[in-house]
Image (tube, rainbow, N blue to C red):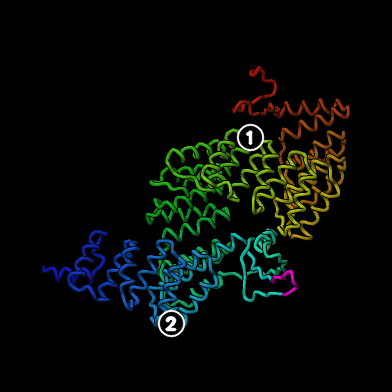
């Protein structure tokens, strides 16, 4: 085979070239044989861009007098691969200005730039261009469009963003209107702070008008429905988009439709739907997906493995989660974080810490979610020394500005008794999410500083952050500990009246505890009785209040409620016995103790622990081993 034949073969079949060295050899041959051929140079640019050689690609591109579409496409793709997103868009505009008509190979890279720039308007403009050029039926272009809109939806869902339109009023009372200008800010009153910083130097005031952005998932749906041909990527994009936005039924329906379209779900499909069954705590369906993955050889896939770990952990099947994790041939940060979070969420705090240390030994770099997952373990174990070590680690790797990590630090320090440090971290945060607000409010509540807790709750409401279920638990806990009866009833009633939140077990428990402490035992009894299914814990709280206030008659009624559900509840027997003793009813005490002996009911010894010199020894009632 002659050199000329080899040269032609390589140009016609560029995939044969497997290294940068071979690409440069081909370049040398072009310079020898046909140095001025724009077609050959364009193909060489495409080859260089495949190896991400931007410098070499640009040298050739700039040497072309009128670059063809292939050359433009290659440079745009190379710009995106190197993170030069603005340059990729600018080159596209240059191509359009030169009269060149882009083909379907150009748009996937360009749409990726729009997504990475988080520029929705630019993306919509490119979408319009695609429609005008008649390429809105191309499979790869449509997949790229759906992927772009899906990423926009993630960004705006995370920010819970608003479009801010404002008018500047100058110091000279001359109104300057910024028409068709919108800025995206997080959903907090920090918006005014941001704008204030922007315009303070110009001595301007402003008016802010907020209107909510519509759902971007509608755009994904429209593109999908217009597609004449769909592949697995098309289906996966729209399935994942629905799943991530909480549209679980739609996502599952699409999986069924996908199979009707003679396409089999792949590992990406399965990893998209597994979190749905985790959310529904549907272990049966989750196991079905696990079985399907095993039959089709997907069970070794790291993404499927991570999703299975998360699903089993959410369904409180930690042993199954551990089994899946242990057989994974490869583990990335997602799989490590899944098992750490699964252990911590199920109360296996020591196991979670052990896996965190193993992850570090395996040279897997922790990401922000690693710290927000493991911090609750330190908080619940009251392991302040470990929490401080992790805090130092967080500062060293530069995650101390991350909102989720900061929120977990606030929670950890508050639960470990360092409420001042928790507040210091909270005040340093640029933006507060619901987790950080709840953590600091609950921290003050547990430390008996109800005034601070209530003040922060009201500040949160004033800043436009809607309190959720857990936030009301925090403020009601504060009211309960401080005996703030009127405030507690106001918050309890506002849950349904102002925010549409149905009171749950924890809210009733706070109110019952507050009424019990105040001696309003009959009101507490009525409140608990109004619950759909009162649990033993709430009745036990009221029974304890009956003992304190020596209300024997009500204590018997409450104990009867408990024994209906759990005839051998040790705590109820002990509290009722103590109530009889407080009321000087010794015969009833003797009868109850006789009944307990016959049933074999014994009081379990109480224990506690406290951290001393980085150790947490346990103390059992009557134990003298630490003396």
Nearest to the observer: residue 410 or residue 526: 410
Marks counted in the figure total 2
Q: Is residue 272 above or below residue 337?
A: below
- Name the residue rendered at 86%, 42% in the picture: 521
Quadrant housing residue 612: top right
Secondary structure beneath label 2: loop
Residue 171 within the magenta-colored segment of the rendering: yes
Q: 10 Å neighbourhood of mark 2: few (<14), some, or many (≥20)? A: few
Q: Which residue is mark 2?
A: 134
Q: Seen in the image, is 118 located left or right of residue 45?
A: right
Residue range of the region highlighted in magenta in the rendering: 167-174
Asked if the magenta segment contains residue 584, the reply would be: no
Q: Residue furthest left?
A: 1
The kind of secondary structure element at disc 1 is loop
Residue at point 59% right, 50% down? 404
Which residue does the numbered mark 1 point to in the structure image?
382
Q: Position of residue 238 (x, y in %)?
A: 50, 67
In the rendered image, the vertical position of residue 200 relative to residue 621, given as above or below: below
């Amino acid at each position: 085979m002659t050199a000329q034949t080899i040269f032609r073969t390589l140009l016609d079949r560029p995939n044969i070239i497997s290294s940068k060295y071979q690409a440069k050899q081909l370049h040398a041959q072009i310079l020898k044989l046909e140095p001025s051929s724009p077609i050959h140079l364009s193909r060489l640019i495409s080859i260089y861009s495949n190896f991400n050689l931007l410098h070499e690609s640009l040298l050739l591109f700039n040497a072309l007098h009128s670059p063809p579409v292939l050359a433009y496409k290659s440079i745009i793709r190379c710009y995106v691969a190197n993170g030069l997103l603005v340059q990729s868009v600018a080159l596209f505009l240059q191509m359009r200005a030169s009269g060149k008509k882009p083909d379907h190979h150009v748009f996937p890279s360009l749409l990726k730039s729009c997504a990475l720039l988080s520029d929705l308007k630019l993306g919509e403009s490119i979408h319009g261009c695609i429609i005008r050029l008649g390429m809105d039926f191309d499979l790869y272009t449509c997949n790229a469009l759906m992927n772009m809109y899906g990423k926009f939806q993630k960004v705006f869902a995370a920010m819970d963003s608003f479009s801010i339109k404002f008018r500047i009023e100058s110091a000279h009372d001359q109104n300057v209107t910024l028409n068709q200008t919108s800025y995206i800010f997080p959903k907090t009153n920090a918006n005014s702070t941001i704008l204030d910083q922007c315009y303070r130097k110009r001595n301007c005031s402003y008016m802010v008008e907020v209107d909510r952005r519509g759902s971007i998932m509608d755009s994904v749906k429209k593109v999908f429905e217009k597609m004449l041909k769909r592949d697995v990527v098309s289906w996966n994009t729209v399935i994942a988009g629905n799943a991530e936005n909480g549209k679980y039924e739609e996502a599952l329906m699409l999986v069924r439709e996908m199979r009707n379209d003679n396409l089999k779900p792949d590992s990406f499909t399965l990893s998209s739907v597994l979190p749905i069954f985790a959310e529904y705590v549907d272990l049966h369906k989750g196991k079905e997906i696990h079985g399907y993955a095993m039959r089709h050889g997907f069970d070794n896939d790291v993404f499927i493995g991570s999703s299975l770990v998360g699903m089993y952990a959410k369904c409180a099947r930690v042993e199954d989660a551990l089994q899946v994790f242990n057989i994974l041939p490869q583990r990335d940060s997602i799989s490590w974080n899944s098992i750490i979070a699964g252990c911590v969420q199920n109360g296996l705090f020591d196991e979670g810490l052990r896996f965190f240390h193993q992850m570090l030994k395996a040279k897997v770099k922790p990401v922000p979610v690693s710290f927000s997952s493991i911090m609750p373990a330190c908080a619940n174990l009251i392991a302040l020394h470990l929490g401080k070590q992790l805090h130092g680690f967080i500062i060293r790797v530069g995650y101390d500005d991350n909102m989720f990590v900061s929120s977990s630090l606030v929670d950890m320090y508050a639960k470990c008794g360092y409420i001042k440090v928790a507040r210091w971290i909270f005040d340093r945060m640029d933006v507060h999410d619901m987790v950080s607000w709840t953590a600091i409010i609950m921290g003050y509540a547990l430390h008996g500083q109800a005034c601070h807790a209530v003040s922060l709750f009201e500040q949160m409401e004033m800043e436009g952050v809607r309190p959720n279920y857990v936030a009301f638990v925090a403020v009601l806990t504060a009211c309960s500990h401080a005996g703030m009866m009127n405030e507690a009833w106001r918050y309890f009633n506002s849950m349904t009246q102002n925010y549409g939140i149905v009171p749950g077990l924890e809210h009733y428990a706070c109110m019952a505890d507050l009424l019990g402490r105040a001696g309003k035992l009959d009101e507490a009894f009525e409140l608990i009785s109004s619950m759909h299914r009162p649990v033993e814990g709430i009745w036990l709280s009221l029974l304890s209040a009956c003992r304190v206030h020596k209300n024997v008659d009500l204590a018997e009624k409450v104990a009867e409620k408990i024994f209906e559900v759990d005839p051998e509840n040790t705590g109820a027997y002990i509290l009722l016995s103590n109530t009889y003793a407080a009321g000087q009813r010794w015969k009833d005490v003797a009868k109850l103790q006789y009944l307990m002996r016959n049933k074999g009911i014994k009081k379990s010894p109480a224990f506690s622990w406290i951290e001393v010199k980085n150790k947490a020894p346990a103390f059992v009632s009557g134990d003298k081993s630490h003396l």
